[in-house]
Image (cartoon, rainbow, N blue to C red):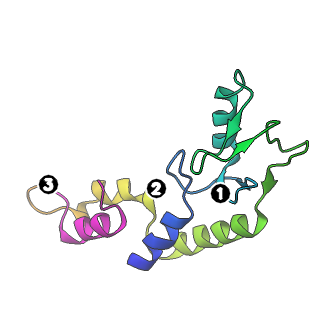
Amino acid sequence: MAESCEVLHSFSCSICLDVLKNPVTLHCGHNYCMDCINGCFDQEDQSGIYSCPQCRHTFNPRPTFNRRPVLKRNTILANLLEEHKKTTRQGTPGKDQMGNHRQSAGFRGQNGKADGSCRLYKSECYPQT
């Protein structure tokens, strides 16, 4: 289970902190959700200096999906994420399913609090919460 959490963490967007959706790679090599990085770049439109949120590498002009320099869709990463989603649905529950576990009677003790298995899962996958 911990391995699945580590994999999921490495596939997360550092802007929204969720699993990458429509992943794109900047020229510096960092990956983001297309909508997330475009949102960041929208905020930098006034200055005209666009930078990677992680390493602060600057880009001029703004990286776009349709023009050069291009935000390239990372198809390998997108395929890996899709495969991970399929595996997660069949086996270990993902982050989006944690709410179901908290609400499920099978994961609650007599006092109405989450039982050990739910707390263990949460602590392994989400130690910061």
Label 1 – label 3 distance at C-alpha = 43 Å
Q: Identify the secondary structure beneath mark 2.
A: helix
Q: Nearer the viewer, residue 100 or 76?
A: 76
Say few, some or many: other residues with alpha carbon within 10 Å of mark 1 (under 14 / 14 to 19 / 20 or more): some
Q: Which mark, by number, is residue 30?
A: 1
Q: Mark 1 vs mark 2: give the one in front.
A: 1
Magenta stretch containing residue 114, yes or no?
yes
> Residue placed farthest to the left in the image?
111
Q: Quadrant of the N terminus?
A: bottom left
Amino acid at dot 2: Asp
Instruction: Tell me whether the residue at label 1 lies in contact with that at label 2, contact meaning CB atoms closer than 8 angstroms.
Output: no
Q: Which mark, by number, is residue 16?
A: none
Residue 11 position, x and y percent, is 57, 63
Q: Nearer the viewer, residue 92 or 11?
A: 11
Placement of 81 over or under 48, stated as above or below: below
Q: Which residue is mark 2?
A: 96
Say few, some or many: other residues with alpha carbon within 10 Å of mark 3 (under 14 / 14 to 19 / 20 or more): few
Residue plotted at (56% across, 53% down): 13
Q: Mark 3 or mark 2: name the one nearer the start of the chain.
A: 2
Amino acid at dot 3: Gly
Label 1 – label 2 distance at C-alpha = 24 Å
**Quarter of the rendering containing residue 98:** bottom left
Left/right of residue 40 with respect to residue 12 in the rendered view:
right
